[in-house]
Image: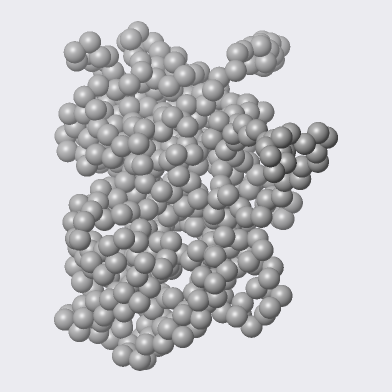
């Protein structure tokens, strides 16, 4: 039996080495469609990915009843009469350590809408590959990814905490890439999106070519935003100022614009430090991100604010928004309006369920031209965190996009990116999904919990071929900027 298994693995390795190069599919769809698209990569290593062969390779998971249906020529599998979240349909696969797996599937539920996750069970552990809010009467695309710590068999299945819904599954894909292939995708992206052919001629005042001329090209300024957070101590150190302004084009103040720094005593606002910092960076051509108008976490509230309620609380919040947003109107690269809006609900508890919506609405009224960011953590970092997964993020963006005050609100996507061990395929897929909005994407507080030598490797793997910009929360964080014009094959569209 061991010889047979070894033979199978050798054959698999041989077939991978001899296989043709497979380009990465950057496409993602955030719209609910009448019919699903064909499986990406023709299903990759998934057998019978489009369910055209009925039950082949698919089986029951848990105690769900599984049946195969067809509507309008489209065949799919249904898990019904579910009693537990994991009651579903599944397929067995073999996962290899060292490979990066990009995953996708099209999902539907039979009524309303419900979050549905893709999970791989392996040796009693559960690897979450991604999630989507599936709807009834149309198909939603789930795009995700995963890596594994050791090779072995695994079982793909889908789960939803809403056991009253049927889970419909179609067009499933699981495509493995080697690290070399993954890096090649980045290199191709660099060649296509970041490089251009330039012709240089050395001529004299008459336009005549100068023979054997020596030409030196020196980059004097970065061609894309790149930076790091700062604190007020930069105002006191000439050496720090010189070092910073020679390297970075964007910055964010760690605390100096936050409410707890500018109004320690109610009614006594003090922006002197923030003003001085902004003036310094404007003088040196360094753009500044506004961080933040308010923070939705209970832990970071002023004591005097906690004591207010009702109309007093509302007026204090409105005054804060008017004060800080109007003061820096038109001077910032963007505002983090309600920081960590998806994880926390301080203002909702005080002002009702529409609190964050109304805060964004007021910020838009006071400064209609500056981009308003939704800034969150774990959207890229943690597939298990359902609070801020790409599907939840998109849902909030749709809500905010309906704001119509002094024109359409200009939104931006802020992703904090506090990584432990980055799941690169999941991170890439999440960016593909959010990139389908056409909105600017900033990685705002990038850090990795790892030794310095490992950090460097991870930053290189995660950012290769992509530009970066400034950060906000922690000393030493960096921030990356993603824009749809830099994401190959991403459709520029946004439909509510």
Q: Depth check: 346 or 493 in front?
A: 493
Counting from the top left corner in percent of width and height, residue 475 is at 60, 68
Left or right side of 27 for 14: right
Q: Horizontal placement of 24 versus 208: left or right?
A: left
Residue 179 appears left or right of 390: right
**Which image quadrant for residue 331?**
bottom left
Q: Whole-percent x and y of residue 220?
A: 66, 55
Compare residues 443 and 67 and report the one nearer the observer. 443
Residue at image location 34% in from the left, 14% down from the top: 51
- 164 vs 273, nearest the viewer: 273
Task: Point out the image quarter for the C terminus.
Answer: top left
- Residue displayed at 16% across by 81% down: 311
Residue at the top extreme, as displayed: 53
Does residue 424 appear left or right of residue 353 in this picture? Answer: right
Q: How is the image coloured?
A: one colour
Q: Which residue lies furthest to the front in this view?
A: 206
Residue at 23%, 73% (x, y): give it. 350
**Which residue extends farthest right?**
212
Residue at point 43%, 49% (across, down)? 441
Screen quadrant of the N terminus: top right
């Amino acid at each position: 039996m061991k010889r047979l298994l070894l033979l199978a693995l050798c054959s698999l390795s041989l077939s991978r080495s001899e296989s043709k190069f497979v380009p990465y599919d950057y496409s993602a769809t955030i719209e609910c469609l009448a019919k699903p698209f064909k499986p990406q990569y023709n299903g990759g290593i998934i057998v019978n990915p489009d369910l055209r062969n009925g039950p082949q390779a698919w089986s029951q998971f848990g105690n769900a009843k599984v049946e195969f249906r067809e509507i309008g020529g489209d065949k799919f599998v249904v898990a019904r009469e579910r009693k537990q979240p994991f009651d579903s349909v599944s397929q067995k696969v073999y996962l290899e350590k060292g490979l990066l797996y990009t995953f996708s599937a099209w999902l539907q539920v039979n009524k309303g809408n419900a979050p549905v996750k893709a999970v791989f069970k392996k040796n009693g552990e559960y690897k979450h590959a991604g999630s989507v809010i599936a709807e009834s009467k149309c198909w939603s695309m789930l795009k995700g990814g995963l890596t594994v710590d050791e090779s072995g068999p695994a079982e793909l299945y889908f789960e939803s905490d809403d056991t009253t819904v049927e889970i419909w599954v179609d067009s499933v894909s699981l495509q493995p890439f080697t690290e070399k292939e993954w890096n090649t995708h980045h290199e191709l992206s660099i060649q296509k999106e970041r490089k251009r052919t330039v012709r240089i001629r050395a001529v004299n005042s008459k336009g005549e070519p100068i023979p054997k001329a020596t030409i030196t090209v020196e980059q004097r300024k970065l061609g894309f935003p790149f930076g790091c957070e700062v604190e007020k101590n930069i105002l006191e150190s000439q050496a720090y100022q010189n070092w910073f302004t020679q390297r970075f084009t964007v910055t964010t103040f760690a605390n100096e614009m936050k409410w707890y720094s500018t109004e320690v005593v109610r009614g006594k606002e003090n922006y002197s430090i923030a003003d001085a910092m902004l003036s310094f960076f404007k003088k040196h051509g360094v753009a500044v991100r506004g961080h933040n108008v308010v923070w939705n976490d209970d832990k970071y509230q002023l004591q005097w604010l906690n004591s207010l309620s009702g109309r007093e609380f509302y007026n204090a919040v409105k005054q804060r928004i008017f004060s800080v947003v109007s003061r820096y109107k038109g001077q910032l690269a963007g505002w983090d309006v309600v920081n960590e809006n998806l994880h926390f609900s301080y203002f909702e508890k005080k002002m009702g369920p529409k609190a964050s919506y109304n805060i964004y609405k007021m910020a838009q009224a006071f400064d209609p031209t500056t981009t308003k960011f939704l800034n969150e953590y774990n959207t890229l970092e943690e597939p298990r965190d359902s609070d801020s997964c790409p599907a939840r993020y998109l849902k909030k963006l749709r809500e905010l996009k309906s704001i119509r005050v002094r024109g359409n609100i200009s939104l931006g996507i802020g992703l904090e990116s506090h990584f432990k061990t980055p799941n690169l395929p999941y991170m890439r897929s999440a960016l593909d999904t959010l990139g389908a909005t056409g909105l600017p994407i900033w990685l705002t507080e990038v850090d990795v919990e790892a030794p310095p030598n490992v950090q460097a490797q991870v930053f290189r793997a995660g950012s290769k071929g992509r530009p970066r910009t400034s950060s906000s929360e922690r000393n030493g964080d960096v921030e990356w900027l993603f824009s749809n014009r830099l994401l190959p094959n991403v459709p520029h569209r946004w439909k509510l």
